[in-house]
Amino acid sequence: MPDLFSPFTLKGVTLRNRTVMSPMTMYNSVDGKLDDYHVSYLGARASGGFGLIFGEQMAITPDGRTTTSCAGIWDDNQIEGHARVCAIVERMGSVPAIQLGHTGRKGSEVPPHKETNEEGTWKQLPPDHPNGWTCVAPSAIPYGGGGHIHPVHELTVAEIKAIHQAYADAAVRAREAGYKWLEMHYAHGYLGASFFSPLANQRTDDYGGSVEKRLRFHTEALDAVRAVWPEEYPLTIRLGSDDLNPAGIQFEDSIYAVAKLKEHGLDLADLSIGFNTDEMVDPPLAEMGFMLERAARVRREVDIPVATSWNLGVPQNADQAIRDELIDLVFLGRPALANPHWPVWAARELAHPDPFGLVPDDWAWWLRNFRGHEASIGWPANRGTEPSTSSSSP
Ligand SMILES: Cc1cc2nc3c(=O)[nH]c(=O)nc-3n(C[C@H](O)[C@H](O)[C@H](O)COP(=O)(O)O)c2cc1C
């Protein structure tokens, strides 16, 4: 039976454990580039023991960003920053992963910590603002919620094909930078999510209507990336699998989607929410592990490895989800922001015999032998004396 600290192998890549730093947009880029900020922030989580490290949704085109201060990989001159991040993540024993995405009708925003709208959520800038632009979408329907009211442009078929090419070009750059894992972002109301949702996609051509047609954007993008992304490296998706609205994405359609994408070379599905509307029925967003049952169903019915995030930061819950074989990997967002050493702490909480085995060897040696001052590092004095319930070494 695997546990949170069992290694995980997918294709030619082995993760040292099942903890993943979930992609999180950082609003800290100039011209879409990664720099010292990202090397430091992501390197710290890699040295903190995570098995797989994502930065943020990397825009495949400039208008695929959330804000003008978000990162991307649409230009060759951005490769160097990504290569620096990949190098530090690998040096710290983790695996570098990239999430490719396009924000669609949820672009042209202001970073939420800088300014919010009247409802206290994301604020969208009008197209004529110096930091704004006209957003693109499957249909000319603005998101609506949270002040996303500015007109959006309905993509032509030629423009959709150009976006697929941009995905492939970005994947080539990601490969050159040194990433070993690639996730396509099809969730959270961004372009992929909106193509899948009847709320946002009301096209009458081959890219809208039936579930097969609403999934065409995704299969073609996956095909374009699969053609250039090394076969030995995992190609995965984050899928907005439920809009929690009777007129939006229904979870049953998502089971079909994952099965179809598996036929196109998908290696793992990371299940999340559609977020194509603010009008969700009883959204369980604060509940512990509320995506677990849905993810487990996909795992069982499609026979594919799965992952999920959402409130899995209590170590016992994360570990149990792996032991029960509901999911294969645990994605951690806010817990990873709050605690770069979350895996070390979790290993200690789970009475693992060697929590410091997760940090680089030279630190590990000192910390394992740091006796008598456990309280000074937030470590109970009985460290290492409890029986282990874990079957593997970190
Ligand atoms: C600051 C912040 C930025 C985020 N940016 C992204 C992103 O770029 N891509 C994405 O798929 N999810 C993004 N998310 C969602 C997280 O990856 C994660 O799925 C979510 O926070 C739920 O996990 P948690 O309960 O462990 O935080 C973001 C979350 C936060 C807090």
Image: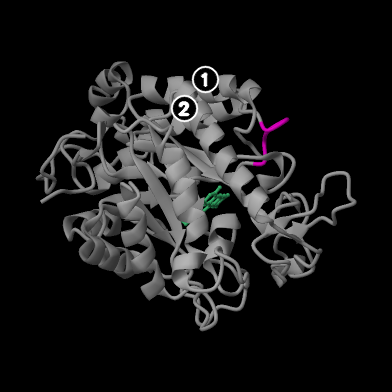
Tell me if 283 is positioned left or right of 6 in this view: right
In the foreground, 212 or 236: 212
Residue at the spot 44% in from the left edge and 58% down from the top edge: 239
In the foreground, 60 or 53: 60
Q: Which of marks 2 and 1 is nearer the N terminus?
A: 2
Q: Is the magenta stretch mostly helix, strand or loop?
A: loop
The magenta segment: 27-32
Tell me if 177 is positioned left or right of 138 in this view: left
Q: Position of residue 331 (x, y in %)?
A: 38, 50
Q: Distance between the residues labelled 2 and 1?
A: 10 Å
Q: Position of residue 269 (x, y in %)?
A: 35, 54
Q: Disc 1 designates what residue?
A: 84
Q: Is residue 21 something one can see in this rendering?
A: yes
- Dot 2: few (<14), some (14–19), or many (≥20) neighbours within 10 Å? many
Using the image, tell me which numbered label, if any, was put on residue 43. Answer: 2
For the residue marked with disc 2, what is the amino acid? Gly
Q: Is residue 31 magenta?
A: yes
